[in-house]
Image (tube, grey):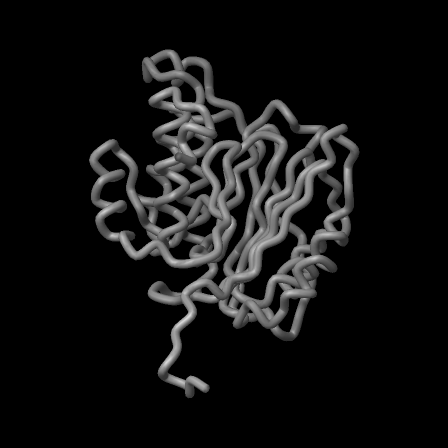
C-alpha cells in the first residue's frame, strides 16, 4: 500500500452536467444535488456552476458577471461600461449567507449591448468588441474581474464546496435548459474566487478534471494573439484557446477537440 506522500492524483476534481435537448428548463437545485454526491472529490477551494437559458427576459443582451474587491473598482468599471455599452439593467447578484462561504467579493451583474457608435468606430464585429472590453476590464482595472459575459447564460462560482456555492447563489431560484458544475481540487494554482471553474468567454463555459502540465507554454502561446491570462489557472487558458480556434479560426468543436 502506498503511504501519504508516495502518491499524487492531479485529477481529483468533481464534474457534472446535464442538458435537456428539447430546451425544457430545469432548476439549479438538480445540479446542487448532483454535485453533492461527489463532495469528496473537492477540497473546498473552489466550486461553480454555469447555466444556459437562465435569463430569458434579457436573452438578447450580454450578461456580464463581475467580482469586485471594493467600491472603487466597481465605480471605475461601471464608468467604463457606461462609455462602451448600453446598460439595460444592473443589480447585485442575490446571495444568502452560508457559514462555509466566507470572504466573498462584491458580486454584480449587468445586461449590456454595445453602443452602436462605439462599435462602428471600433471596426470590430460585436463579439470581438465584447471580448476586448471584458479583457480590458480584467487587465486594466485593479480589483475587477469579468467571469461571465455570454448571452442568456451565466456563471456562478466562488471558494467553497460546490454544493455550498450553489446554495450561496440561490441557484434553486434559476431555471435553465443546460447546466455544468465543477468542484475544484487545486493542484498548482491558488484557490481563489476568480480561479474557480467554470471559466467563460462569450457563450463558452469550460470545466475540466485534471491538470494541464503545459500551462505556462499554453499561456505564452495564446497571449501572442491578444488574450491576457489574469486568473491564474490552466482552465482560463483552455477557454481562450477554444475561443481562438472556434471563433477566430473557424474550426468546428470536434476539430478543436482533436
Residue at left 46%, top 53%?
Answer: 68
State which quadrant residue 58 falls in. Answer: top right
Residue at left 40%, top 16%?
Answer: 125
Q: Quick one: 148 or 52, which is closer to the camera?
A: 52
Vertical placement of 123 versus 20: above or below?
Answer: above
Vertical placement of 240 versus 151: above or below?
Answer: below
Vertical placement of 88 versus 183: above or below?
Answer: above
- Horizontally, residue 244 falls left or right of residue 52, namely left
Picture mark count = 0
Q: Position of residue 88 (x, y in %)?
A: 60, 28
Q: Position of residue 6 (x, y in %)?
A: 36, 82
- Horizontally, residue 204 falls left or right of residue 161, namely left
State which quadrant residue 132 falls in. Answer: top left
Quarter of the picture holding the C terminus: top left
Q: Position of residue 233 (x, y in %)?
A: 36, 55
Residue at left 48%, top 51%?
Answer: 208
Q: Quick one: 112 or 244, which is closer to the camera?
A: 244
Q: Position of residue 61 (x, y in %)?
A: 58, 26
Q: Quick one: 190 or 11, which is closer to the camera?
A: 11
Q: Quick one: 229 or 244, which is closer to the camera?
A: 244
Amino acid at each position: 500500500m502506498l503511504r501519504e506522500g508516495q502518491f499524487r492524483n492531479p485529477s481529483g476534481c468533481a464534474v457534472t452536467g446535464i442538458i435537456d435537448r428539447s430546451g425544457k428548463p430545469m432548476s439549479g437545485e438538480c445540479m446542487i444535488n448532483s454535485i453533492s454526491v461527489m463532495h469528496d472529490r473537492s477540497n473546498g477551494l473552489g466550486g461553480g456552476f454555469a447555466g444556459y437559458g437562465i435569463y430569458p427576459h434579457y436573452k438578447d443582451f450580454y450578461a456580464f458577471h463581475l467580482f469586485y474587491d471594493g467600491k472603487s473598482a466597481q465605480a471605475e468599471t461601471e464608468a467604463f461600461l457606461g462609455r462602451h455599452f448600453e446598460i439595460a439593467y444592473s443589480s447585485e447578484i442575490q446571495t444568502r449567507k452560508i457559514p462555509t462561504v466566507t470572504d466573498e467579493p462584491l458580486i454584480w451583474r449587468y445586461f449590456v449591448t454595445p453602443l452602436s457608435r462605439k462599435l462602428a468606430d471600433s471596426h470590430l464585429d460585436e463579439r470581438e468588441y465584447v471580448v476586448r472590453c471584458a479583457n480590458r476590464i480584467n487587465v486594466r482595472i485593479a480589483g475587477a474581474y469579468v467571469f461571465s459575459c455570454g448571452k442568456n447564460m451565466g456563471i456562478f462560482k466562488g471558494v467553497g464546496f460546490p454544493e455550498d456555492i450553489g446554495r450561496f447563489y440561490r441557484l434553486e431560484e434559476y431555471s435553465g435548459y443546460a447546466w455544468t458544475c465543477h468542484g475544484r481540487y487545486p493542484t498548482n494554482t491558488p484557490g481563489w474566487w476568480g480561479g474557480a471553474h467554470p471559466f467563460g468567454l462569450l457563450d463558452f463555459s469550460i470545466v475540466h478534471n485534471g491538470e494541464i502540465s503545459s500551462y505556462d507554454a499554453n499561456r505564452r502561446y495564446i497571449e501572442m494573439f491578444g488574450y491576457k491570462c489574469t486568473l491564474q489557472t490552466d482552465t482560463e487558458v483552455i477557454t481562450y484557446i477554444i475561443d481562438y480556434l472556434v471563433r477566430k479560426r473557424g474550426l468546428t468543436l470536434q476539430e478543436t477537440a482533436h
